[in-house]
Image (spheres, coloured by chain):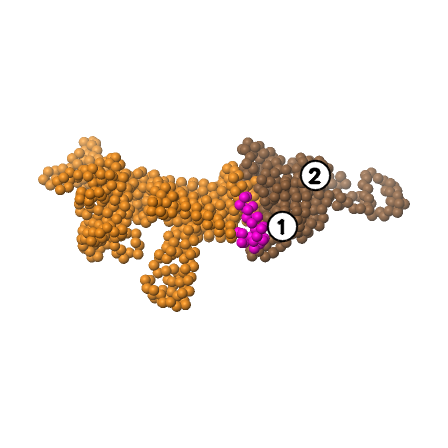
């Protein structure tokens, strides 16, 4: 996670028509000990996720995002319908050889250190010792934990634990990566690095399924999204087309004089358009924060706000 | 030593004997089939209730085929990875504290057990074996039962089951890991115990010229020296030395010492050797026990002198009653020391006190089974309770002026009868089959000690397997309780079976309660009232439950061999093999149940 790529990355390689995940009429009802219905967590979900795309599951708490992911991973069994991953039933163990999963929280063994953790998960993939060692060393460096690889996970901060959690999800070089709230617990830099990594995974041709309530994160990286509410699919489609505001036109330019701006207003009026706003754009708080941090690192001792002023 | 359960040879035990009794293997297969059919039927009924008959059948088929596939694709690397994790988890959970507790227990034994007791070896061995069993089983019980539920609760299991790991591998990995931990703990405890017992038993006595005086033979000539050693470990020995100053002490606390004179600096000092015979592993040859009643007629059992425990039968003194042990397949070459050692550990039942410090007189007779007229009396001996009488039978003996060769005249086909009778009238001898045996040899005590620890290990394996099995479908505390119940129940399997089959005098719990309320004796028939009939009916139901439960639980009591080690008898390899089979017999279905239950469990629920 040392990449310094910025903002929304350009589109990755073309999405394949291969279907990696498919759900058919997938439903889940939670029942109590006596078999009585407690919650209908998911209602007849039909979904297809194709190879090479980043797919986001969006929705408020209790909307069925995590239930969907757990059904796809075989952690839960469907009440009705079917969940297929790589064409196999989700309860089929062999599908897991091609999957990496980062849970919502870092559910790892706290008495192991980073190296032991990755070695352990590598063994679960039946990897030979040499491959395990090599991949573990590479991933530990990639997630920036080389300096803490011998420390037990119980000594890790939340962000560090997320990083080692991500490393364990990638230990098998998976084709499908399932990320449950991937940016939870990460600082803005960590968030950005996580997003860059997700985009990088797509660039390598991998499929990413993520769920999050952080809409900006989803917007930044996802190709397609599904919005769930109370267990039902409410919207499904490409992010860019879903977010496109029809009937409005945005112009963005730099170096225009007052006169030029007046002229543009006139042109809009002449064509019977209605000017909604013409102003200096604002950056995002994330962008501002990252700029300050980078500037502070580049010029230690100076008040970083100046850098922002200069920029503005 | 009281061995109520005598086991036949492994083959006979597994496949059945000549009398047509069902072999353990066939009984096990029948039980497994019954269990399989019952669980399939129950699953289908339950599944039909939830999903309808067709879908229920389909789900059951999927579970069965999935389980078979899982079993066929078990990866040793994954299993060992999970086992290593379980070991690390055990260490993290401070299971080594068990060792510290054990050290404290050994210190307590060293400080507070009186070394002057009549049989210190028995006391020390009993204590170390008991505490080791308790600690290892308790640790295994807890570790195995709480680990998987803790993983499910902490959700760390999510990162395991989303890898290509099968439920069978998770279950096996846990069991293997906890067995590895338990094995290390047991090995360390065993080593500590062995060193402790050896050091506690090891001693010598001081013996100087001042402790000795000249011994005189019957004709008045001086033959060597006699005296008493100095006190050590709460006892002293009488000693008799030959003219060279060498000799042997008498038996005290179950052991003797060799004494050797050492000439040094113009004087003589005496070197008393280490204790011998204190900690032994006798390898006995058992015979078949039959009886003759007071009229001399053959009978299968003797008299019951009123004991509820019917393990031993009694013969009446001053009558023709006798107990005969028939030994078979005796060979001269099995007794290279030129004599047979016969040991006898019988009970004495007195109807009058007599001289309490003196034993009750009995007679041992060697008889040719084919020709009872050829016999030889070993002479009169005096039997005391809880004392092992040791007799040496020479290969050649004289009877009525005729020389008899043991193997030629008394045991021509390797078959020898040894008859025991009680001499005083109105006194009784009680015996069971293992109470008389010929000593084949004495094995190394440390090997027997290791065998005793192997028996503890077997029980630890079983407790661990049951703990993990319960933890696949119960929460941690409930699984631990269930495991504890299985363990305790396992120690009372015999009693449950007796209750189930109605052998227990006084009936079941309800009948006993009614008898207590009505103050009715155990042997009397109860009046037929509504309350009595309801109670008896409930006892009938309970009996069925007892029979089923006693069949489902392993007999932990029968798996113990501590009494062999403690009492100084070699644990037969045949017995250990039977125990291994018994453990496997319970482990395999427990593993299968664990695989299936964990496979059908939604870990994220």
Give the chain letter at badge 1.
Answer: A
Residue at 41%, 52% in the rendered image: B550
Q: How far apart are labels 1 and 2 at the CA level?
A: 26 Å
| Mark 1 vs 2: CB contact within 8 A | no
Q: Which residues are magenta?
A: B43-66
Q: Are marks 1 and 2 on the same chain?
A: yes
Q: Residue furthest bottom?
A: B529
Asked whether, in this view, residue A44 is left or right of residue A255, the answer is left
Where disc 1 sits, the SS reads strand
Q: Is residue B50 magenta?
A: yes
Question: Which mark, residue B115?
Answer: none
Residue at 28%, 42% in the rendered image: B285
Q: Position of residue A283 (x, y in %)?
A: 75, 43
Q: Which chain is orange?
A: B
Q: Main secondary structure of the magenta part?
A: helix
Res B383 visible: no
Q: Is residue B492 above or below residue B213?
A: below
Q: Which chain is brown?
A: A
Give the residue pinned by disc 2.
A17
Q: Position of residue A46 (x, y in %)?
A: 68, 47
Q: Position of residue B554 (x, y in %)?
A: 41, 49
Residue at 59%, 48% in the rendered image: A76
Say which label, 1 or 2, has the lower sequence index.
2
Residue at 63%, 40% in the rendered image: A86
Q: Position of residue A180 (x, y in %)?
A: 63, 45
Res A246 visible: yes
């Amino acid at each position: 996670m040392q990449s310094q790529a910025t903002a929304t990355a350009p589109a990755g390689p073309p999405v394949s028509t291969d279907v990696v995940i498919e759900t058919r009429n997938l439903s889940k009802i939670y029942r109590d000990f006596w078999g009585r219905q407690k919650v209908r967590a998911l209602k007849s979900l039909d979904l297809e996720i194709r190879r090479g795309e980043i797919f986001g599951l969006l929705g408020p708490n209790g909307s069925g995002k995590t239930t969907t992911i757990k059904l796809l991973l075989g952690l839960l069994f469907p009440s009705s319908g079917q969940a297929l991953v790589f064409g196999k039933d989700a309860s089929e163990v062999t599908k897991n050889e091609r999957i990496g999963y980062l849970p919502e929280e870092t559910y790892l063994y706290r008495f192991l250190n980073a190296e032991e953790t990755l070695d352990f998960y590598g063994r679960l993939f039946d990897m030979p010792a040499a491959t395990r060692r090599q991949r573990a060393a590479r991933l530990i460096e990639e997630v920036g934990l080389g300096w803490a690889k011998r420390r037990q996970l119980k000594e890790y901060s939340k962000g560090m634990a997320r990083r080692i959690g991500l490393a364990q999800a990638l230990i098998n070089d998976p084709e499908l990566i399932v990320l449950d709230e991937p940016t939870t617990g990460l600082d803005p830099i960590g968030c950005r690095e996580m997003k860059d990594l997700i985009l990088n995974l797509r660039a390598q041709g991998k499929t990413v399924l993520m769920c999050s309530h952080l809409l900006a994160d989803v917007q930044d990286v996802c190709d397609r999204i599904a919005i769930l509410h109370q267990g039902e699919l409410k919207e499904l489609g490409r992010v860019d087309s879903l977010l496109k505001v029809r009937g409005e036109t945005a112009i963005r330019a730099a170096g225009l004089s007052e006169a030029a701006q007046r002229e543009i207003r006139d042109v809009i009026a002449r064509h019977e358009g209605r000017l909604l706003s013409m102003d200096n754009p604002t950056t995002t708080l994330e962008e501002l924060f990252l700029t300050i941090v980078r500037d502070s690192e580049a010029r230690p001792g100076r008040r970083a706000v100046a850098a922002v002023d200069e920029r503005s | 030593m009281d061995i109520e359960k005598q086991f036949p040879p492994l083959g006979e035990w597994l496949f059945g004997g000549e009398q047509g009794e069902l072999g353990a293997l066939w009984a096990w297969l029948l039980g497994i089939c019954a269990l399989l059919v019952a669980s399939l039927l129950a699953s289908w009924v339950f599944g039909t209730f939830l999903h309808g008959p067709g879908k229920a059948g389909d789900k059951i088929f999927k579970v069965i085929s999935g389980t078979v596939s899982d079993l066929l694709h078990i990866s040793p690397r994954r299993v060992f990875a999970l086992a290593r994790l379980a070991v690390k988890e055990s260490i993290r959970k401070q299971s080594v504290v068990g060792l510290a507790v054990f050290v404290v227990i050994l210190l307590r034994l060293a400080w507070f057990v009186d070394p002057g007791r009549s049989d210190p070896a028995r006391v020390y061995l009993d204590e170390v074996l008991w505490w080791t069993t308790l600690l290892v089983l308790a640790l295994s019980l807890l570790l195995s039962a709480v680990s998987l539920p803790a993983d499910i609760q902490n959700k760390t299991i999510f990162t395991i089951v989303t890898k290509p790991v099968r439920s069978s591998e998770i279950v096996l990995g846990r069991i293997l890991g906890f067995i590895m931990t338990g094995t290390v703990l047991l090995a360390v405890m065993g080593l500590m115990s062995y060193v402790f017992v050896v050091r506690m038993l090891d001693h010598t006595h001081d013996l100087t010229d001042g402790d000795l005086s000249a011994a005189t033979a019957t004709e008045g000539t001086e033959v060597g020296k006699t005296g008493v050693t100095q006190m050590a470990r709460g006892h002293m020995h009488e000693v008799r030395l030959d003219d060279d100053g060498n000799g042997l002490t008498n038996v005290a606390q179950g052991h003797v010492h060799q004494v050797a004179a050492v000439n040094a600096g113009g004087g003589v000092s005496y070197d008393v050797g280490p204790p011998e015979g204190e900690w032994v592993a006798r390898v006995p040859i058992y015979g078949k026990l039959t009886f003759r009643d007071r009229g001399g007629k053959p009978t299968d059992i003797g008299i019951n002198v009123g004991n509820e425990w019917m393990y031993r039968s009694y013969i009446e003194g001053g009558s023709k009653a006798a107990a005969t042990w028939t030994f078979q397949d005796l060979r001269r070459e099995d007794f290279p020391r030129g004599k047979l050692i016969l040991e006898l550990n019988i009970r004495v039942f007195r109807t009058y006190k007599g001289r309490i410090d003196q034993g009750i007189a009995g007679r041992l007779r060697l008889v040719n089974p084919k020709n009872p007229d050829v016999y030889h009396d070993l002479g009169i001996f005096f039997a005391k309770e809880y004392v092992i009488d040791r007799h040496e039978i020479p290969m050649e003996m004289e009877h009525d002026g005729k020389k008899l060769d043991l193997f030629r005249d008394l045991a021509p086909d390797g078959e020898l009868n040894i008859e025991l009778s009680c001499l005083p009238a109105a006194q009784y001898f009680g015996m069971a089959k293992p109470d008389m045996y010929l000593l084949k040899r004495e094995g190394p005590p440390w090997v027997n000690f290791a065998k005793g620890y192997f028996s503890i290990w077997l029980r630890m394996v079983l407790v661990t397997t049951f703990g993990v099995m319960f933890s696949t479908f119960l929460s941690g505390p409930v699984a631990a309780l269930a495991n504890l119940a299985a363990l305790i129940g396992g120690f009372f399997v015999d009693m449950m079976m007796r209750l189930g089959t109605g052998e227990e005098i006084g009936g079941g719990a309800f009948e006993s309660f009614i008898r207590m309320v009505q103050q009715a004796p155990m042997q009397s028939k109860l009046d037929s009232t509504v309350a009595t009939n309801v109670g008896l009916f409930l006892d009938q139901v309970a009996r069925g439950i007892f029979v089923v439960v006693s069949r489902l639980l392993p007999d932990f009591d029968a798996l113990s061999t501590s009494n062999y080690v403690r009492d100084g008898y070699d644990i037969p390899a045949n017995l250990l093999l039977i125990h291994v089979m018994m453990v496997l017999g319970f482990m395999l279905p427990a593993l299968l149940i664990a695989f299936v239950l964990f496979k059908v469990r939604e870990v994220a629920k």
